[in-house]
Amino acid sequence: MIEQLKIRQFIEEREESLSPYAVRSRLSKGRVVPEEPSPTRTCFQRDRDRIIHSKAFRRLKHKTQVFIAPTGDHYVTRLTHTLEVSQIARTIARALNLNEDLTEAISLGHDLGHTPFGHVGESILNELFPGGFHHNEQSLRVVDCLEKNGHGLNLTWEVRDGILNHSKTGLSKLYGEDWGTVGTLEGEVCKIADLVAYINHDIGDAIRAGMLSERDLPKEALDVLGYSHSERIDTMVCDIIMFSWGVTGKSGGPVQIGMSERVKKAANLLRDYLFENVYSIETRSRMSQEARETLVFLYEYFLKHPEEIPGDVLKCSDTLERGVTDYIAGMTDQYALNLAQKLNC
């Protein structure tokens, strides 16, 4: 009956009303391994569902965003960050008449490869692994080969491209020289939504942790963006939509995702303040040092005991170092701490 109703085709027909610059699911560049299309879902809806049902997605709830092993219940985790990015990105995509399903799939999958202990963990694995470690590349490894017991999720080219290219370098300013590009406008939306989300929720976490107060934030930025969490997000999202309106095809403006100079300058000011007064301090905290000791111990231990690494992880790796890195990167904070303690007895 569902096959006769042709639900997917109806959805694809509705996509014809999207912006001329939006990605149509029927025109996707496809998957590495071709599959029969779903009778009820477009290829991007299918990708979204595969990501949500993956083990890597579930583990995000126990992975650090900024603060390692916080004692409060309201700190942001990698999972809640991902959901915030998805919500912000979908709002922008809907307003600009882009493909919301593609935007959502990229957003939900963008951090699947993040390490335990947040950016501290990423920095440590980058030092340990000879090939260097970057969470966006690891996220692609997760969906390409590590998930489903080493078979991967076989996602579409557009979602994979958005996941790989969402990341900025640690020192990259908003639309700075090393901002990089994504292959779709939907991917660009996710990239900027990631920054909007983390700037604002990291301020909230830093205040919650007692590292700063609202009055410590640079007034020049707050005068532009707003004096509350919701005001700042609303200002940034509305500015992105207005600046990027040419993407809808309803005006003669440039076809690009971005921010006005005024809002971009204020956002970069807040971002710089966080790097100087929160991130750099957190990396020197007692928990960050414990995280370093934990990951170094686990890396060295599994190099000596590769037989203890799950086989489905090793079969995806061309070297032992790669396999050890894949295994550790997939761990949650608490699992890594408990395992190191158990193995170090």
Image: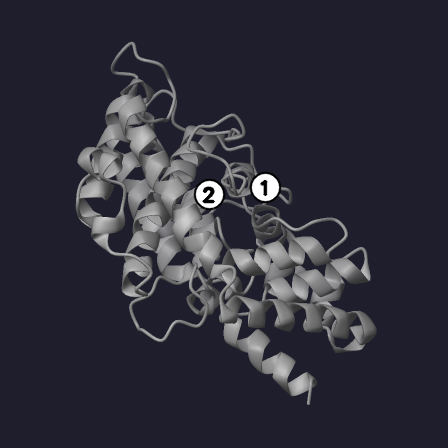
Q: Position of residue 278 (x, y in %)?
A: 40, 54
At x 33%, y 29%, the residue is: 265
Name above or below for residue 337 compared with residue 320: below
Towards the viewer: 8 or 207: 207
Question: In the visual, does 166 lie left or right of 299?
Answer: left
Please, which residue is most extreme toward the top here?
252
Residue type at mark 1 is: Arg
Q: Position of residue 204 (x, y in %)?
A: 28, 56
N-terminal label among 2 and 1: 1
Q: Position of residue 302 (x, y in %)?
A: 75, 72
The residue that disc 2 covers is 43
Residue 11 location, quadrant: top left
Can residue 97 be seen in this snapshot? no
How many neighbours does mark 1 have within 10 angstroms: few (below 14), some (14-19), or many (20 or more)? some
Can residue 296 be seen in this snapshot? yes
Tell me which colouring the rendered structure shows. one colour
Towards the viewer: 105 or 222: 222
Residue 152 location, quadrant: bottom right
The residue that disc 1 covers is 31
Towards the viewer: 129 or 250: 129
Name above or below for residue 8 compared with residue 284: above
User: Quarter of the image containing the C terminus?
Assistant: bottom right
